[in-house]
Amino acid sequence: KAGVTQTPRYLIKTRGQQVTLSCSPISGHRSVSWYQQTPGQGLQFLFEYFSETQRNKGNFPGRFSGRQFSNSRSEMNVSTLELGDSALYLCASSNRDRGRDEQFFGPGTRLTVL
Amino acid sequence: AQTVTQSQPEMSVQEAETVTLSCTYDTSESDYYLFWYKQPPSRQMILVIRQEAYKQQNATENRFSVNFQKAAKSFSLKISDSQLGDAAMYFCAYRSSRGQTGANNLFFGTGTRLTVIP
């Protein structure tokens, strides 16, 4: 079974631009969570989507948004990029509706904001 | 809010020896899950081991085992017979019991970088 995939793997943007990151979960998994990883703040939860609905949200500004499609693929969008948004963005999928709650992570998207 | 603390930013171990990574957490909940994740230089986060708080028995996965002390809110990871492939960043993580809050998100510690010396 294929693992969690994220595209693109690397991205360079400039301040003020917006960016969209994509995550495809493991087949059959309906929950997708997003995390931001930075050297200063560590790993922080952004949001979780389950069956196309946002179930939980971390403490991030409204510039960070996401959505999930009917095939469980998820996208994360960051508008009006700031230098501090430079980070590794990880997504994780889980099969939470079947009692299996381990989160399986993708390789991440490295976003650099110049 | 739940917090997870890893007080050892870096650790090193000789190949074939045993090393223990420390983790403490703070929560007011009685039911929760604890995890250790490994992040090698390739960046892919891998689940190493999990522990349900309601289970008194410590979890074990091959060379990896935990020492779960619920009253002390401590959750350490022991790696036996260390191998070169164990070199990575190790993160301790907490997740609330879904039945209480419905939340599925993980709270992570700051990580411990483990070096394995040949």
Image: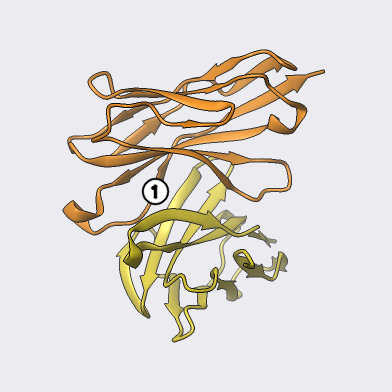
State the residue at coordinates (62%, 21%): B10
Q: Residue furthest bottom?
A: A70
- Report x, y in % for residue B21: 52, 21
Above or below: residue B85 compared with residue A80? above
Secondary structure state at the residue bearing disc 1 = loop
Above or below: residue B64 compared with residue A107? above
Using residue B15 as the reference point, say whether residue B10 is left or right of it.
left
State the residue at coordinates (56%, 67%): A81
In this structure image, what is the colour of chain A? yellow
In this view of the protein, which residue sits in the foreground, B39 or A12?
B39
User: Residue A16 is drawn in which quadrant?
Assistant: bottom right
Instruction: Name the subunit of mark 1.
Output: B
Chain appearing in orange on the rendered image:
B
Using residue A97 as the reference point, say whether residue A68 is left or right of it.
right
State the residue at coordinates (26%, 24%): B70
Using residue B66 as the reference point, say whether residue B82 is left or right of it.
right
